[in-house]
Image (cartoon, rainbow, N blue to C red):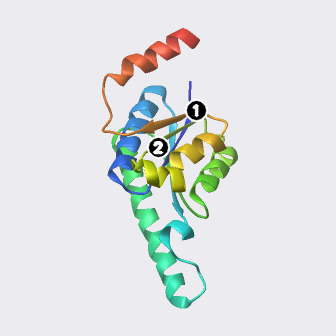
């Protein structure tokens, strides 16, 4: 069904819930998980002009390596292959590029749960990703639910 699953992560609780769900699904499907962290200068409020700001970018990249490493450890514990990457740029654009460049077939991501006003003004990253990629996107709002298994198997049976 899916051989390659992308989990964009920012290290948040919701992102880690999404990673758990993606890894569980990947284990069942024998798929590879890709963990991606994007250093978004706009969201991080950094612009690499001064040496101090370059240092801040390095901190964000190190943090990205740490959080993608956490996902890789979770995957390894579950017997799932995991590829990690850290990129610079606009988050949803980098996710879309990664999907295209790596033949990703499914994106599983967390949602921060912006307020209605924040979402109207900024738009959610999940919404932008859904509009930017040509593959299915699953948005995880809460801790994974074991009851999801029957839906996945049911979907596979119906379309398989």
Q: Left of 140 or right of it: where is 6?
A: right
Of labels 2 and 1, earlier in sequence is 2
Q: Which mark is residue 109?
A: 2
Residue 57 coordinates in the image, percent (x, y):
51, 76
Please state the horizontal and vertical placement of residue 111, each as a whole percent of the image.
Answer: 42, 46
Q: In which quadrant of the rendered image does the N terminus lie?
A: top right
Q: Residue at image x 49%, y 77%?
A: 58
Q: Decide: is 155 above or below 81.
A: above
> From where the camera sits, is residue 34 visible?
no
Residue placed farthest to the top in the image?
Answer: 158
Pointer 1 local density, CA inside 10 Å: few below 14, some 14–19, many at least 20: few
Under circle 1, the secondary element is: loop
Provide residue 19's location: percent of width, then percent of height: 40, 43
Q: Quadrant of residue 144?
A: top left
Determine the CA span between mark 2 and mark 1.
Answer: 11 Å
Query: Left or right of 88: which side holds 27?
Result: left
Q: Quadrant of residue 149?
A: top left
Residue 33 rendering spot, x and y as whole percentages = 49, 42
Secondary element under disc 2, as helix, strand or loop, is strand
Q: Nearer the viewer, residue 58 or 81?
A: 58
The residue sitting at 43% across, 31% down in the picture is: 25
Residue visible at 32% across and 22% down in the picture: 147
In terms of depth relative to the viewer, which is nearer, 134 or 26?
134
Q: How many numbered discs sit on the rendered protein?
A: 2
**Closer-to-camera residue (155/126):** 126
Q: Residue at x 64, y 48 (%)?
A: 96
Q: On the image, numbered disc 1 is attached to which residue? A: 136
């Amino acid at each position: 069904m899916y051989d390659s699953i992308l989990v964009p992560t920012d290290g948040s609780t919701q992102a880690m819930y999404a990673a758990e769900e993606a890894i569980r699904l990947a284990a069942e499907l024998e798929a590879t998980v890709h963990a991606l962290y994007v250093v978004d200068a706009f969201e991080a409020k950094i612009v690499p002009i001064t040496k101090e700001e370059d240092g801040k970018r390095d901190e964000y990249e190190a943090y990205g390596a740490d959080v993608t490493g956490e996902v890789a450890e979770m995957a390894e514990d579950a017997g799932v292959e995991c590829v990690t990457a850290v990129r610079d740029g606009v988050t949803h654009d980098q996710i879309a590029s990664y999907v295209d460049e790596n033949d990703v077939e499914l994106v599983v991501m967390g949602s921060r749960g912006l307020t209605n006003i924040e979402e109207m003004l900024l738009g959610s990253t999940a919404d932008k990703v859904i509009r930017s990629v040509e593959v299915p996107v699953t948005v995880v709002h809460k801790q994974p639910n074991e009851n999801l298994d029957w839906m996945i198997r049911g979907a596979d049976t119906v379309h398989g």
